[in-house]
Amino acid sequence: MTDPSDEVVPRPSAANGDVEVVGVSKRFGGVPALSNVTLTIRRGEVHALVGENGAGKSTLGKIISGVYSPDGGEVRVGGESVTFRSPRDAMDRGIVTIAQELAIVPYLNVMENVFLGAEPKKLGFVRRRVMRQRYEELSDRVGFHLPATQMAGTLTTADQQKLEIMRALSRDASTIIMDEPSAALSMHEVYALHGVIRSLAASGTTVILISHFLSEVLDLAGTVSILRDGRLVRNAIAAEETESSLIESMLGRSLGQAFPDKRLSATDAPVILEVDDLVAPGVRGASLSVRAGEIVGIAGLVGSGRSEFAHALYGATRVTGGRISVGGVDVTHHRPHQSLREGIAMIPESRKDQGLLMGRPISENVSLARLGALSHFGIMSPGSERSRVADALEQVRVKMASVRTPVSSLSGGNQQKVLFARTALCEPRVLIADEPTRGVDVGSKRTIYDVLVEQAAAGLAIIVISSELEEVLGLAHRVVVMRDGHFVAELSGEEMTQHAVLEAAFGESATTAS
Amino acid sequence: MTEASGIALEPVDGSASHFTWRRFGGLWRTAGILIPFLIFFITLAIANGQFLTRQNLVVNILYLQTPVLIIAAAGTLVLIAGGLDLSVAATFVLAEDIAAQLALHTNPVVAIVVAIACGALVGLVNGMVVAYLRINALIATLAMAFVVSGIAEVATNNTFYSLFDKPSLGKFATTNFLGAQSAIWITLVVVVLLGMALWRTTFGRYVFAAGGNAEAARLAGVRVSRVRIATFVLSGAAAALAGVISLAQTLTTTPYSNESSLAFTVLAGIVVGGTSIMGGDGSVTRTVIGVLFIALIQNGFDLLQFNSFLIPLVTGVILIMAVSIDVWLRQRRR
Ligand SMILES: Nc1ncnc2c1ncn2[C@@H]1O[C@H](COP(=O)(O)OP(=O)(O)OP(=O)(O)O)[C@@H](O)[C@H]1O
Ligand SMILES: [Mg+2]
């Protein structure tokens, strides 16, 4: 562990491309998001920022990249104080961000998105051939191969993320800020990304990495800065840290176990959810039954049909075959509002596209699925709404200024928790959680896990879909593995190992059933 | 429980200052249109002695704007839900014609009810075309404007009606009550009801949700198509009500060609009020201010006896200025 003071002293070497943050503060409407943060990011280093949801990581990244201007303090690049008025200014100084909430133009193709605003031009006309060539070169360098002419809006989240990384690299950035880049990626995509980050650093590009995956941080970063409540707790050399030492600084306490104890569900508990040979878009005959109190994990690669299964269950896509019943009631052809009435709730995979009304207040986002119970004859009862919403938010510990602020002003992880609060309000019998902890910090993950386990104990049937294998294994009583729209394996007890799940997911071994 | 939630909701350190800021922030949004409105209002009051008279404020401005206010209030809901209704002018004229014929042959109550029902029906068709055939609202309602004005023409044989022989329908708009005409009271009720619907009802929440993020709304159990259709029905009914009021005010019907710009006047009022053309944001109150703001411009020209040919030009310039201020204020907030 290092003494923070020798990290924060501005280095005399002015021209070497270090990015220095000196005494930076930022408030949003009187609430401090950053207070007097000072740190130095050395050229060519992977510098990680860690901290709880709302600690100010993204805000710091946005200040460095010119999205926000600091209320106090300054940013120096190569010893020279800079004032960025826009991300464009920062880009001109070689600083590029890959945002937590992705920013692509859905109706332009991949290549056009990559070169957006920096198209090779001659006399005002875009030189498509040159662009194409540069795109191919870039693809080879990065190792991502996205179809150049595919409409960006049709890409999966992971591919959109890759697109953003390619865009940053195409700008010859000297500093790339990555805000939770791996949150939406599948396992092997994460490996690819790690490779890219390493080679970037090796070639002298600075990477500022914001991540909740501490193992990733320890793996990649040279220096780690830990933020808590907008303050810098300390700077540390990654090699001298462990996950738990980081967690302690992040939370101000130690976490204990990552997962709550599994409470075994009674084997004679009634089956609540019964899915029989379900056929729907992306799902080709899947059967599953879940008892009250049981947490079933669904593992599988990205694109294996897990989210499609969830959507079909919830009635968000048309079921073309098979049968779904909840507590004996046939819900096969229900639509979402009917599913909610029968007690099925779903937390969708993408909070931005499928979950939240970004411009609306937090409270409205929480209550949206349960307005019937919070109103009389269609007229809202503000009192009961306020108290029910406050209870639900408190259950999942959302950090915010006021329930009336737009949900877009929350940090990413807190936005995720708002979705949890929404389902909590619905009092469902079946809860489908698709990537429930995407972008959530370690401490709050534990809170969400506790909520899930408590809800299971209260008799809910819970389905957890996650790309984080540890999460599925740590939470679920039973894991089913999906591949190509089928369940190819069901594992429980001792069989639930990473190895077994991966084998089934990739379909390389005799473990594959069905 | 209460104590803990208090902590979760309001950080102890800055809650007081934060809340004043929040209110301030909310005020700023309204201020975007209210400030230019007030500046204009005060300027006119100083520049011309007739401006602040009852005749001018209540009759020349409010009374004559009642049809536009009603249509714009309902149109605000359509826009927030992510739609757009360009067929209101045609519906307005259709309602006038229907009400006029029925008033001549039956009684005024039947005329009013049937005309409004026809407007709602037009809205229903609009909504279904937009929601189920998934045709862009701009195109669907533009086409509907042709269809409806065509129907009106055929049904009336291209003649205009006057009710001077049977003027009882006129009472619907002109009856004096507590110092204002019934048209103003009706408008007040409609505007307040729509404003309350948006602000205080589940329907209002669904309207915001449908326009803010349709997919998220759907997955949260909102029946987005129904909500959108409902807003179109309200818009159609409002346009018809406006037509009936206009008929009652003048006792004559107007040709569609004279009213075809009504849809744009309405839209201008809504947008000047800061309702997002992209959906998901807006308010009826601000629409009312927006509509009255545009009315003030015209009123100013009349009072100051400027060349009325300049009205469209000046209206356009002021529109752009008002909207720029709104955009600027919105960006400032970050
Ligand atoms: N535009 C904004 N308006 C108001 N408050 C904001 C805004 N952006 C951020 N905040 C607040 O500033 C604080 C820091 O947010 P920030 O997004 O930097 O957190 P973070 O560390 O990136 O969290 P996460 O891990 O959840 O992404 C939060 O309390 C957040 O609510
Ligand atoms: Mg963040």
Image (cartoon, grey):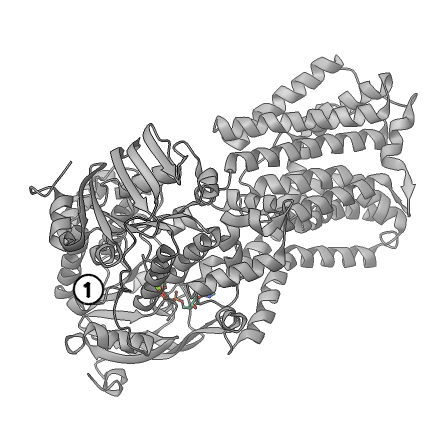
Rendered location of residue B70, percent (x, y): 72, 39
Q: Can residue A10 be seen in this view?
A: no
Q: Which of A14 and A326 is in front in this view?
A: A326
Horizontal side, residue B70 vs residue A80: left or right = right
Horizontal relation, residue B3 to residue A287: left or right: right
Residue A312 point in image, percent of width and height:
35, 37
Q: Can residue A263 be seen at all in this image of the molecule?
A: yes
The part of the image, by quadrant, that contains residue A211 is bottom left
- Chain holding disc 1: A
Question: What residue is drawn where x is 39% and y is 75%?
Answer: A229
Q: Residues within 10 Å of mark 1 (few under 14, many from 20)?
A: some
Numbered disc 1: secondary structure: helix
**Does residue A65 sit above or below A478 in this rendering?**
below
Q: Count of labels shown? A: 1
Q: Which residue is drawn at 18% across and 54% down?
A: A493
Locate residue B300, reporting x and y percent.
78, 48
The quadrant where residue A512 appears: top left
Reading the image, the residue beneath label 1 is A216
Residue A389 percent coordinates (x, y): 52, 59
Mark 1: amino acid: Glu
